């Protein structure tokens, strides 16, 4: 028993605690605003102008969040542009007021002054076909009412986006490993197999679990942190830090 506990402790220390400590040390010296009032919330220019073309598009974006939370997690959101539309529609879940916000910020805005990146994009006929499903998944989100937000382990902003991606597997998207809350599931334990049978996901309240499959690779989840490896698109998944791309 003692040897087993020792092995588990060593595993958690090496795989989870040390990467988190290193990322927190890096984040502590990053120049960032002290409050949301001081932060930059303007467009980052990551997305092309909505009028640049007439094609439909669906984007998943993410950026480090504010305060010390940014050492551990990103905030993610969904952007939709219908065919021939002159503007984007952005959907976030936030922790104040009515949780689901539509166009509360520019589509590709900085988040607490942190520049976002495109996690996944679908453009053209595929996006046009998927947008009704995306909008239906947003409308059907079960934690959309006031009070339906919990920063950890969820349901939070990343739980919302993860719900949409789960409901619309044809998007083919997966949130970054440091999107804390993406693995939240209600109740004590949950087992989910994607409709296309490409992934299996098991969790105990979003605290401990695993995922495996063509889309997820191999992941181990602990207290909202994710460690693993992506084989199809070679990368390491390092807790708090995120994806580290590999070239094999």
Image (cartoon, helix red, strand yellow):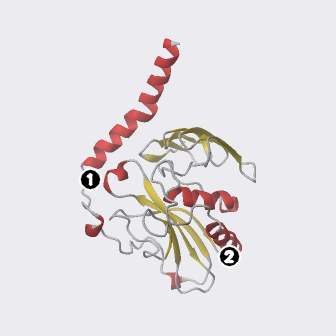
**Gap in Å between the C-alphas at discs 1 and 2?**
40 Å
Q: Is residue 162 visible?
A: yes
Instruction: Classify 185 as above or below 204.
Output: below
Number of on-image labels: 2
Q: Residue at x 49, y 44 (%)?
A: 224
Callout 1: few (<14), some (14-19), or many (20+) C-alpha neighbours within 10 Å?
Answer: few
Q: For the C terminus, which image quadrant?
A: top right
Which residue is more in the foreground, 122 or 2?
Answer: 2
Q: Quadrant of residue 9?
A: top left
Q: Quadrant of residue 189?
A: top right
Residue denoted by label 2? 128
**Residue 211, image x and y in percent?**
62, 41
Q: Pointer 1 and pointer 2: residues touching (CB < 8 Å)?
A: no
**Secondary element at image label 1:** loop
Residue denoted by label 1? 30
**Residue 111, image x and y in percent?**
38, 65
Callout 2: few (<14), some (14-19), or many (20+) C-alpha neighbours within 10 Å?
Answer: some
Residue 105 lies left or right of residue 209; in this view the side is: left
Which residue is more in the foreground, 11 or 224?
Answer: 224
Residue 220 lies left or right of residue 131; in this view the side is: left
Q: Is residue 212 visible?
A: no
Which residue is more in the foreground, 9 or 115?
Answer: 9
Which residue is more in the foreground, 4 or 54?
Answer: 4
Compare marks 1 and 2 and give the one earlier in the sequence.
1
**Secondary element at image label 2:** helix
Query: Which numbered dot is residue 56?
Result: none
**In the current view of this chain or complex, which residue is farthest to the front?**
147
Instruction: Classify 233 as above or below 65.
Output: above
**Residue 61, image x and y in percent?**
49, 64
**In the current view of this chain or complex, which residue is farthest to the top?**
2
Q: Residue at x 61, y 58 (%)?
A: 163
**Residue 3, image x and y in percent?**
50, 13
């Amino acid at each position: 028993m003692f040897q087993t506990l020792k092995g588990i402790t060593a595993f958690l220390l090496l795989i989870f605690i040390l990467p988190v400590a290193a990322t927190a040390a890096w984040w502590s010296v990053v120049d960032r605003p002290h409050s949301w009032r001081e932060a930059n919330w303007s467009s980052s220019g990551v997305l092309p102008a909505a009028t640049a073309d007439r094609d439909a598009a669906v984007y998943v974006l993410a950026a480090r969040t504010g305060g010390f939370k940014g050492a551990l997690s990103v905030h993610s959101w969904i952007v939709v542009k219908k065919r021939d539309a002159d503007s984007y529609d952005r959907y976030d879940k936030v922790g104040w007021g009515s949780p689901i916000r539509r166009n509360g910020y520019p589509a590709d805005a900085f988040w607490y002054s942190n520049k976002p990146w495109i996690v996944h994009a679908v453009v053209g006929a595929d996006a046009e076909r998927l947008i009704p499903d995306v909008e239906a998944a947003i409308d059907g989100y079960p934690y959309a009412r006031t009070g339906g937000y919990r920063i950890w382990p969820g349901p939070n902003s990343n739980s919302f986006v993860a719900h949409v991606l789960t409901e619309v597997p044809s998007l083919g998207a997966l949130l970054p490993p440091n999107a804390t809350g993406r693995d939240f599931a209600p109740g004590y334990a949950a087992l989910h197999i994607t409709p296309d049978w490409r992934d299996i996901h098991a969790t105990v309240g979003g605290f401990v679990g695993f995922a495996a499959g063509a889309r997820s690779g191999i992941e181990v989840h602990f207290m909202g942190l994710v460690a693993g490896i992506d084989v199809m698109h070679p990368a390491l998944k390092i807790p708090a830090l995120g994806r580290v791309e590999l070239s094999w």
